[in-house]
């Protein structure tokens, strides 16, 4: 047995519309096709994969927190400008000895998203 890849993660959210806007407008996922469940939610896609499932807390599910989910991105400068524009709370670190930049962003759901940028994408920080 082996695990091939992360399929998706699910967040129960108190404000579905705000969460959809955050993950699409700030992070860059796209809101896509979702099975016709009998409860509100959204499936957000990275390319052709639904990597984030949002479920409305109004269904009686307890709002929970995943420590974080990580996305590999390109476009470091553009992302930093987006985060500053929306006033997102974040912290930036580098993996010691690897040069990889990690940006940890607090989400509207009180979860955290890690954005991973390779050294050649980050370049000279503005």
Image: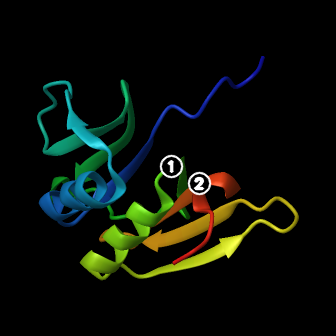
Which is nearer the eye, 27 or 61?
27
Q: Tell me which label, 1 or 2, sits earlier in the chain.
A: 1
Closest to the observer, 97 or 123: 123
- Seen at 25% across and 76% down, the residue is 86
Q: Quadrant of residue 1?
A: top right
Say which mark, if any, is on residue 121.
2
Query: Residue placed at 42% from the left, 70% from the top?
Result: 80
Relative depth, front residue between 94 and 50:
94
Per the rendering, the mark at residue 54 is none
Query: Where is residue 20 drawn, in percent x and y?
Result: 21, 54
Residue 50 in which image quadrant: top left
97 with respect to 68 (left or right): right
Q: Which of these two is toward me, 59 or 86?
A: 86
Outermost top residue:
1
Q: Residue at x 55, y 64 (%)?
A: 67
Residue 72 in the image: x percent, y percent? 55, 47
Residue 8 picture location, percent across and down: 46, 37
Secondary structure at badge 2 equals helix
Q: Residues within 10 Å of mark 2 (few under 14, many from 20)?
A: some
Q: Position of residue 93 (x, y in %)?
A: 67, 75
Left/right placement of residue 38 relative to residue 89 reads: left
The residue sitting at 49% across, 61% down in the picture is 76
Q: Judge whether residue 64 can be spotted in this image.
A: no
Residue 88, visible in the rendered structure: yes
Would you name the residue on which mark 1 appears?
Answer: 74
Image-quadrant location for residue 81: bottom left
Describe the colour scheme in one phrase. Answer: rainbow
Task: Provide the secondary structure element on which disc 1 rests.
Answer: loop
How far is mark 1 from mark 2, CA to CA? 6 Å
Instruction: Describe residue 45's horizontal placement relative to residue 60 as left or right.
Output: right
Tag 1 near tag 2, CB within 8 Å: yes
Compared to 41, does 100 lie above or below?
Answer: below
């Amino acid at each position: 047995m082996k695990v091939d890849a992360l399929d998706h993660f699910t967040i129960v959210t108190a404000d579905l519309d705000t969460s959809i806007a955050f993950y699409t407008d700030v992070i860059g996922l796209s809101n896509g096709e979702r099975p016709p469940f009998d409860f509100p939610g959204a499936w957000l896609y990275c390319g052709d994969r639904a990597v984030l499932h949002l479920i409305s807390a109004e269904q009686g599910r307890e709002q929970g927190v995943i420590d974080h989910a990580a996305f590999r991105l390109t476009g470091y400068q553009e992302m930093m400008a987006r985060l500053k524009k929306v006033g997102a709370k974040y912290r930036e670190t580098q993996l010691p000895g690897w040069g990889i930049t990690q940006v940890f962003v607090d989400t509207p759901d009180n979860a955290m998203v890690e954005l991973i940028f390779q050294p050649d994408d980050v370049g000279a920080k503005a």
